[in-house]
Image (cartoon, rainbow, N blue to C red):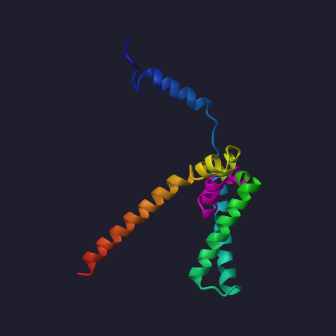
Amino acid sequence: MKPEGPQSPRAQEYRAHVADLAPKSPMWKNCIKAFFVGGAICTLGQVLTWVYTALCRLEPTQASAWVSITLVFLGATFTGLGWYDELGKFAGAGSIVPITGFANSVVAPAMEFKHEGYILGTGAKIFTLAGPVLVYGISASVLVGLVKIIIGLFVSR
């Protein structure tokens, strides 16, 4: 019996059947919700920057570091309280793109596997989702840094 290829009539019929049964996603509605929730999180970051520079009299770089710390703390706390999951269901990518989403991706697996113990559960699983983000983020920053150094060597001559 000859296997059917990807363009066979049966494969096309199957794809059409799946498309008919698949729920239709309200793409524009989801995009708008993601835009406004992600924007609100970023606006909170900007307000915190102003508060840290004006009221706490921090330099802009110090204020930026404290904003990151505050947003990660809020993301981790809201994940622990179960609020961040609800925000994620509502906003989708709008909740995972800012730095609060990174905090959520670290805390959520730790909470999920805490019943397995602190070492083999929380400690082993805490970076299951965040690990690849860290690996690729660090790798990309090293590559960009190397490219900048190489370009700098040629431009300075």
Q: Is residue 44 above or below residue 88?
A: below
Which residue appears at 50% of the width and 58% of the height?
Answer: 134
Region in magenta: 87-107
Q: Nearer the viewer, residue 48 or 35?
A: 48
Residue 17 appears in view: yes
**Is 71 displayed left or right of 18 in the figure?**
right
**Chief secondary structure of the magenta span?**
helix
Residue 127, position as x, y percentages in the image: 57, 53
Residue 115, position as x, y percentages in the image: 71, 44
**105 in the magenta segment:** yes
**135 in the magenta segment:** no
Q: Quadrant of residue 84?
A: bottom right
Q: Quadrant of residue 43?
A: bottom right
Which residue in the rendered view is the most extreme toward the top? 1
Q: Is residue 39 above or below residue 20?
A: below
Which residue appears at 45% of the width and 62% of the height?
Answer: 138
Which residue appears at 62% of the width and 55% of the height?
Answer: 106
**Is 15 displayed left or right of 48 in the figure?**
left
Looking at the rendered image, the quarter that the N terminus falls into is: top left
Which residue appears at 68% of the width and 76% of the height?
Answer: 48
**Count of numbered circles in the view:** 0
Q: Nearer the viewer, residue 78 or 5?
A: 78
Q: Quadrant of residue 18?
A: top right
Residue 153, position as x, y percentages in the image: 27, 76
Residue 46, position as x, y percentages in the image: 64, 75
Residue 94 appears in view: no
